[in-house]
Amino acid sequence: MSSMALRFTTSYLMDAVDLFRYYKKLAERAMAQVTDEQLLTVLDGEMNSIAVIVKHMAGNMRSRWTDFLTSDGEKPDRHRDTEFTDPPATREALLAIWEEGWQRIFRALEPLSEHDLQRTVTIRGEAHSVMQAINRQVAHYSYHCGQIVLLAKHFKHAEWQSLSVPRRQSAEFNRRVLGGEASQR
Protein backbone atom coordinates (compact mmCIF):
# COMPACT_ATOMS: atom_id res chain seq x y z
CA MET A 1 0.00 0.00 0.00
CA SER A 2 1.35 3.38 -0.93
CA SER A 3 1.95 5.70 1.98
CA MET A 4 1.39 8.81 -0.15
CA ALA A 5 -1.14 10.92 1.66
CA LEU A 6 -3.96 12.51 -0.21
CA ARG A 7 -2.91 16.08 -0.84
CA PHE A 8 -5.79 18.40 -0.10
CA THR A 9 -6.07 20.96 -2.85
CA THR A 10 -8.62 23.17 -4.51
CA SER A 11 -6.42 23.42 -7.59
CA TYR A 12 -7.85 21.48 -10.50
CA LEU A 13 -4.43 21.24 -12.16
CA MET A 14 -2.68 19.96 -9.04
CA ASP A 15 -5.39 17.37 -8.57
CA ALA A 16 -5.25 16.30 -12.23
CA VAL A 17 -1.47 15.83 -12.06
CA ASP A 18 -1.88 13.87 -8.81
CA LEU A 19 -4.50 11.64 -10.46
CA PHE A 20 -2.25 10.99 -13.45
CA ARG A 21 0.60 10.09 -11.09
CA TYR A 22 -1.70 7.81 -9.09
CA TYR A 23 -2.87 5.85 -12.15
CA LYS A 24 0.67 5.63 -13.53
CA LYS A 25 1.91 4.16 -10.26
CA LEU A 26 -1.08 1.82 -9.98
CA ALA A 27 -0.40 0.29 -13.39
CA GLU A 28 3.33 0.10 -12.69
CA ARG A 29 2.70 -1.79 -9.46
CA ALA A 30 0.48 -4.22 -11.38
CA MET A 31 3.01 -4.70 -14.20
CA ALA A 32 5.77 -5.31 -11.66
CA GLN A 33 3.89 -8.39 -10.44
CA VAL A 34 3.75 -10.17 -13.80
CA THR A 35 6.40 -11.99 -15.81
CA ASP A 36 7.81 -10.65 -19.06
CA GLU A 37 5.84 -13.35 -20.89
CA GLN A 38 2.61 -12.29 -19.18
CA LEU A 39 3.10 -8.71 -20.39
CA LEU A 40 2.66 -10.09 -23.92
CA THR A 41 -0.09 -12.64 -23.19
CA VAL A 42 -3.55 -12.20 -24.70
CA LEU A 43 -6.57 -13.96 -23.24
CA ASP A 44 -8.30 -14.29 -26.62
CA GLY A 45 -8.30 -12.82 -30.11
CA GLU A 46 -10.41 -9.82 -29.13
CA MET A 47 -8.29 -8.85 -26.12
CA ASN A 48 -5.17 -6.74 -25.89
CA SER A 49 -2.10 -7.75 -23.93
CA ILE A 50 -0.72 -5.47 -21.25
CA ALA A 51 2.08 -4.59 -23.68
CA VAL A 52 -0.39 -3.58 -26.40
CA ILE A 53 -2.35 -1.45 -23.94
CA VAL A 54 0.88 0.27 -22.91
CA LYS A 55 1.87 0.83 -26.56
CA HIS A 56 -1.54 2.34 -27.30
CA MET A 57 -1.40 4.59 -24.24
CA ALA A 58 2.10 5.76 -25.14
CA GLY A 59 0.98 6.58 -28.69
CA ASN A 60 -2.01 8.47 -27.38
CA MET A 61 0.12 10.35 -24.87
CA ARG A 62 2.64 11.37 -27.55
CA SER A 63 -0.17 12.62 -29.76
CA ARG A 64 -2.27 14.38 -27.15
CA TRP A 65 0.44 16.04 -25.06
CA THR A 66 3.02 17.10 -27.65
CA ASP A 67 2.45 20.81 -28.26
CA PHE A 68 -0.69 20.43 -26.16
CA LEU A 69 -1.85 24.05 -26.33
CA THR A 70 -0.82 24.77 -29.91
CA SER A 71 -1.56 21.78 -32.14
CA ASP A 72 -4.38 19.31 -32.62
CA GLY A 73 -4.22 16.44 -30.13
CA GLU A 74 -4.50 13.92 -32.95
CA LYS A 75 -1.17 14.36 -34.70
CA PRO A 76 -1.05 13.68 -38.47
CA ASP A 77 1.82 11.22 -37.98
CA ARG A 78 -0.07 9.13 -35.44
CA HIS A 79 -1.21 5.80 -36.81
CA ARG A 80 -3.50 4.62 -34.04
CA ASP A 81 -4.27 1.24 -35.60
CA THR A 82 -0.58 0.27 -35.44
CA GLU A 83 -0.62 0.82 -31.67
CA PHE A 84 -2.55 -2.45 -31.37
CA THR A 85 0.08 -4.61 -33.08
CA ASP A 86 3.69 -5.54 -32.46
CA PRO A 87 4.34 -4.14 -28.98
CA PRO A 88 7.90 -3.81 -27.73
CA ALA A 89 9.32 -7.28 -27.09
CA THR A 90 11.10 -6.54 -23.80
CA ARG A 91 9.98 -5.15 -20.47
CA GLU A 92 12.72 -2.52 -20.69
CA ALA A 93 11.58 -1.26 -24.09
CA LEU A 94 7.95 -1.30 -22.99
CA LEU A 95 8.64 0.65 -19.81
CA ALA A 96 10.75 3.15 -21.77
CA ILE A 97 7.82 4.13 -24.04
CA TRP A 98 5.52 4.10 -21.00
CA GLU A 99 7.76 6.49 -19.08
CA GLU A 100 8.30 8.75 -22.09
CA GLY A 101 4.53 9.05 -22.57
CA TRP A 102 3.88 9.96 -18.95
CA GLN A 103 6.69 12.50 -18.94
CA ARG A 104 4.99 14.24 -21.89
CA ILE A 105 1.88 14.63 -19.75
CA PHE A 106 3.74 16.11 -16.83
CA ARG A 107 5.80 18.45 -19.04
CA ALA A 108 2.59 19.69 -20.65
CA LEU A 109 0.57 20.15 -17.46
CA GLU A 110 3.02 21.33 -14.82
CA PRO A 111 3.64 24.77 -16.38
CA LEU A 112 -0.08 25.50 -16.85
CA SER A 113 -1.99 27.96 -14.69
CA GLU A 114 -5.61 27.77 -13.63
CA HIS A 115 -6.28 30.51 -16.20
CA ASP A 116 -5.12 28.12 -18.96
CA LEU A 117 -8.06 25.82 -18.16
CA GLN A 118 -10.32 28.17 -20.13
CA ARG A 119 -8.16 28.03 -23.24
CA THR A 120 -9.26 25.98 -26.23
CA VAL A 121 -7.43 22.99 -27.69
CA THR A 122 -8.57 20.66 -30.44
CA ILE A 123 -8.66 16.89 -30.67
CA ARG A 124 -9.47 15.56 -34.13
CA GLY A 125 -10.59 19.05 -35.05
CA GLU A 126 -13.14 19.31 -32.21
CA ALA A 127 -12.75 22.16 -29.76
CA HIS A 128 -12.26 21.30 -26.08
CA SER A 129 -11.50 23.53 -23.15
CA VAL A 130 -8.16 22.57 -21.62
CA MET A 131 -10.15 21.24 -18.65
CA GLN A 132 -12.27 19.05 -20.93
CA ALA A 133 -9.17 17.72 -22.69
CA ILE A 134 -7.54 16.87 -19.35
CA ASN A 135 -10.72 15.19 -18.08
CA ARG A 136 -10.96 13.19 -21.29
CA GLN A 137 -7.43 11.86 -20.81
CA VAL A 138 -7.82 11.15 -17.08
CA ALA A 139 -10.83 8.99 -17.97
CA HIS A 140 -9.04 7.33 -20.89
CA TYR A 141 -5.87 6.48 -18.99
CA SER A 142 -7.68 5.32 -15.84
CA TYR A 143 -9.74 2.99 -18.03
CA HIS A 144 -6.63 1.44 -19.54
CA CYS A 145 -4.77 1.31 -16.23
CA GLY A 146 -7.75 -0.63 -14.88
CA GLN A 147 -7.38 -3.08 -17.78
CA ILE A 148 -3.70 -3.52 -16.92
CA VAL A 149 -4.57 -4.20 -13.28
CA LEU A 150 -7.31 -6.67 -14.23
CA LEU A 151 -4.99 -8.62 -16.54
CA ALA A 152 -2.15 -8.66 -14.02
CA LYS A 153 -4.49 -9.83 -11.27
CA HIS A 154 -5.84 -12.56 -13.56
CA PHE A 155 -2.32 -13.80 -14.35
CA LYS A 156 -1.17 -13.79 -10.72
CA HIS A 157 -4.24 -15.50 -9.23
CA ALA A 158 -3.59 -16.30 -5.56
CA GLU A 159 -0.13 -14.67 -5.67
CA TRP A 160 -1.66 -11.25 -6.39
CA GLN A 161 -0.61 -8.51 -4.00
CA SER A 162 -3.47 -6.07 -3.57
CA LEU A 163 -2.97 -2.54 -4.85
CA SER A 164 -5.81 -1.08 -2.82
CA VAL A 165 -7.78 -2.29 0.18
CA PRO A 166 -7.19 -6.05 0.55
CA ARG A 167 -10.26 -8.24 0.86
CA ARG A 168 -11.74 -8.45 4.35
CA GLN A 169 -9.45 -5.66 5.58
CA SER A 170 -11.65 -2.59 5.11
CA ALA A 171 -11.97 -1.84 8.82
CA GLU A 172 -8.20 -2.06 9.31
CA PHE A 173 -7.59 0.15 6.27
CA ASN A 174 -10.09 2.74 7.53
CA ARG A 175 -8.34 2.73 10.92
CA ARG A 176 -4.98 3.33 9.20
CA VAL A 177 -6.37 6.21 7.11
CA LEU A 178 -7.92 7.84 10.17
CA GLY A 179 -4.62 7.38 12.02
CA GLY A 180 -2.64 9.00 9.21
CA GLU A 181 -0.76 5.76 8.44
CA ALA A 182 -2.30 5.22 4.98
CA SER A 183 -4.09 7.18 2.30
CA GLN A 184 -7.00 6.65 -0.02
CA ARG A 185 -4.70 7.44 -2.96
Image (spheres, helix red, strand yellow):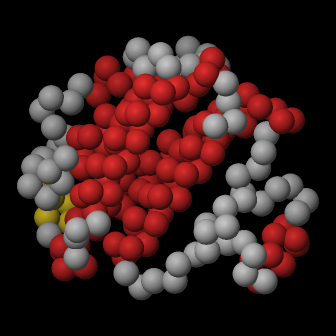
Q: Judge whether 103 appears above or below 158 on screen.
A: below
- Front position in the image: 93 or 19: 93
Q: How many marks?
A: 0
User: What residue do we see at 45% from left, 83% from top?
Assistant: 9
Q: Residue furthest left?
A: 70
Horizontal side of residue 75 vs 3, given as left or right = left
Q: Does residue 176 appear in the picture of this structure?
A: yes
Q: Residue at x 61, y 22 (%)?
A: 36
In the image, taking residue 24 as reference, residue 66 lies left or right, namely: left
**Residue appearing at x 76%, y 49% in the figure:** 162
Would residue 162 be found to the left or right of residue 10 on screen? right
- Which percent across, then down, holds residue 40? 56, 19
State which quadrant residue 44 falls in. Answer: top right
Q: Is residue 138 above or below residue 15?
A: above
Tell me where residue 74 appears, x and y as whole percent.
19, 40
Q: Is residue 180 left or right of residue 122?
A: right
Image height check: is 27 above or below 176?
above
Residue 183 drawn at (x, y percent): 67, 72
Q: Quadrant of residue 149?
A: top right
Residue beneath the point at 52% across and 83% down: 8
The C terminus: image quadrant: bottom right
Q: Quadrant of the N terminus?
A: bottom right
Q: Is residue 37 above or below residue 159?
A: above
Q: Is residue 127 visible?
A: no
x and y percent of residue 26 in the render?
59, 50
